[in-house]
Image: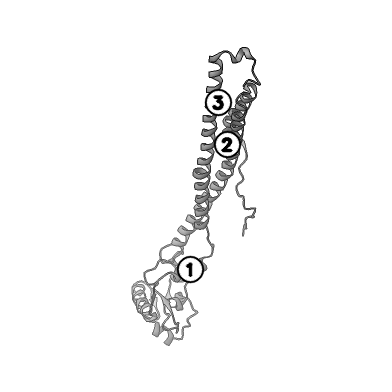
Amino acid sequence: MQDRYSPNVMSQGPIVNFIVWRRSVLLMLFSASLGAFIFFLIGDVWTTFGHMRDMQQFATWNASYSQWKNQTTTGLQEIHCQEIDIHFESVLKSYARTHVVHAHSCAEMKGNGMKCEDQVDRVIIGCRKPGFLPGGNLCQEAISDHCPYACNLAKCRDTRNATLDYTLFSIHFARAMLYKLMEQFTRGELFKLALSGIAKFVTVILTFGACLCWADWPRSRLMLFFAWFVTFSAPFIRSVVFTPTSLTGTTLNRS
């Protein structure tokens, strides 16, 4: 301080004490800005990045009903194939009340010359349920899906009470699209958090520079002014800057 201020100023105790007190305030400002930057990285950025990563995993979806059905069937419990054949006999009996059914068991289907690749509507005449009703895609499924033992399949999954229709497929598809949308929103939020992080880091540098030159009143005051300007202008810049809808660089396959 003696190198920067005249002896007349240094001889006034209250002024010297005020300048020294101002140094303590600058140190507190630097500690506060550094703590805000560290908590910003640990709290906001890491939490948002983890949320985006979770949404990205949930959004992984193949928009193919057959592949979704095979994937869902793979997760079911493995049982003996004959149990599925027996269950399908009760299904045929229930359809026989309102439809013409050519066979009432899987063995009878094979005896009537029906192939495993044929659809169920060859057995149940007039089976025309809308595809989006529960069980509506039964008529368009292959006989081998419901008579695996008669079709000589080795391993079977318990699909007797499983819901594998288009309704559940549409629900899973809509849920995956919602997760994908949330992922894109989180990516945009992460992009804006990067702008806020840059502003906070610049504020830390400016307040640290003000602490280093605390004795130089005009210079430290100028640095504090720029730190204040960066801090309060960052939210406005964050609101104005365009947020990209996707940061992956991939194009949308419209097919």
Q: Amino acid at mark 3?
A: Arg
- Measured from the top left, where is residue 190 in percent x and y? 56, 45
Helix, strand or loop status at disc 1 = helix
Mark before the other along the chain sequence, 2 or 1: 1
Residue that appears at 54% across and 30% down: 27
Q: Quadrant of residue 244?
A: top right
139 relative to 230, above or below: below
Res 200 label: 2
- Measured from the top left, where is residue 32 in percent x and y? 51, 33
Q: Mark 3 — residue? A: 23
Question: Which one is nearer the viewer's eye here, 201 or 94?
Answer: 201
Give how far apart the Cα atoms at labels 2 and 1 are.
Answer: 47 Å
198 relative to 144, above or below: above
Q: Amino acid at mark 2?
A: Lys
Q: Quadrant of residue 243?
A: top right
Give how far apart the Cα atoms at labels 3 and 2 are.
Answer: 21 Å
Camera-near label (3 vs 1) is 3
Give how far apart the Cα atoms at labels 3 and 1 are.
Answer: 66 Å
